[in-house]
Image (cartoon, grey):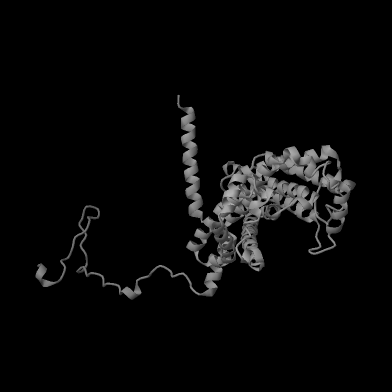
Amino acid sequence: MNEASGVEPVGLVEPVDGVPRQLSGPVVPAAPVPAAQVPSAPVPPRGPVAAFGRAMEAFTGRALGRHQAAVVRIGFGLVWLAYLLREWPNRRVLYGDRSPWSMELARRLLADDGAFTVLPWFGGRLWFELVYHLAVLAALAVLLGWRTRASTVLFLVTVLSLQNRDVLLGDGGDNVVHLMAVYLVFTRCAEVWSLDARRPGPGRSGVVLWALLGAALAACQAGDFSGDSLTWTAPTFPYLGWAPLFWGLWAVAGLWWLLGRLRPEGEPRAVLDALANMVHNCAMLVIAAEVVLIYATAGWYKVQGSRWQDGTALYYPLHLHYFTPWPGLSGLVGSALLPVFLISYATVILQVAFPFTLVNRRVKNVLLVVMMAEHLGIAVVLGLPVFSLAMVAADAVFLPTGALLWAAARLGRLGRLRRRLVRAP
């Protein structure tokens, strides 16, 4: 057979038992498969139903905004810790036995509004000192992310206890800390940049802390000293007291640890993890909505003010002794009428426009940087560090993840460089 015949020769293949095996006929090449019949990768479904399914999968499958939640936790832990340390010499006058707002007046107000605080339980200086220094430790634990499930609850208890002791002392920054202390309890804010994230396992110290907190909660609820603070029901909406919240968090934490030890890969643990993700995502959404609401209401209320309309609103606090920690700087800024006029109008425009910039990521990021810089300026010029730092920490919920990772990498490099310099001979 030759190649010109167009027929393949009869081929010999590998010998079988030493004897060459001959094919029974000519080798015919396989016919090509049409392109239309070649199987392709499955195309993901499209449409509103498919988009809703993907959204639900992301909503239940993972904690969204983990880095933003960590920054919010670190920020508010730092704000409250700095405030408590700054006011440590004046703590008894602000919230203790030397306060002009006596404990009797506080009890009367608490009986009317039903606010939660543990300071009236025993009264006296010893109990106040214990609560105040527990607040310092809880703020430090939240800042570092140590046993965050327990420390965020203690952070909430101490924030509410001190602020509700004398409601006349609070300002905008205290209100923001008050709200965020509630929201942080429901977030998974320690998955990154925390001591909890570095811990290899749950350990036994968590169980001991869980048992101690349960015993303390039971003792407080059983004792007559707690009054109506730890009731199961409330006379007003949502008709639930603080006891269901605290006992519910305590029970869920115990169940979480138990399933993690017995059935870490089981379906009950997966259900709890999905529920935790959903609660976290809802809490982050509420935090973002709270920030938008703060800016929107502040901006629209400023629009209605005559001093903001004529651009002189910033001029007056710059000439008040209470808002002039640096008299020279305040006098320099207040003497420049045109910058005061422009800053007053820019503040109103930025606050009113902020909710609308969320539809454009780039515009939102630029405006966010400007507003954070403005808050830092307020902290320095007007002497309102708690309010300014609280708003900067709340604004962090809108920061892009890439920027946070970039900043963390730079801080890590600075830390490694510092350690090398310290170890160098």
**50, above or below 290, in the image:** below
* Outermost residue to the top: 425
Tell me residue 385's x, y (percent). 64, 48
Q: Residue at x 57, y 49 (%)?
A: 332
Q: Is residue 158 left or right of residue 415?
A: right
Name the one closer to the observer, 2 or 238: 238
Name the one closer to the observer, 88 or 276: 88
Q: Residue at x 88, y 46 (%)?
A: 225
Task: Classify residue 287 by image quadrant.
Answer: bottom right
Name the one closer to the observer, 188 or 161: 161
Q: Is residue 382 left or right of residue 28?
A: right
Q: Is residue 280 visible?
A: yes
Q: Residue at x 17, y 65 (%)?
A: 10
Name the one closer to the observer, 189 or 379: 379
Task: Classify residue 142 by image quadrant.
Answer: top right
Q: Quadrant of the N terminus?
A: bottom left
Q: Is residue 97 left or right of residue 325?
A: right
Q: Quadrant of the C terminus?
A: top left
Q: Is residue 116 left or right of residue 354?
A: right
Q: Residue at x 21, y 52 (%)?
A: 18
Tell me residue 176's x, y (percent). 68, 55
Q: Is residue 375 visible?
A: no
Tell me residue 166's x, y (percent). 80, 50
Number of dots carrying numbers: 0
Tell me residue 16's x, y (percent). 24, 55
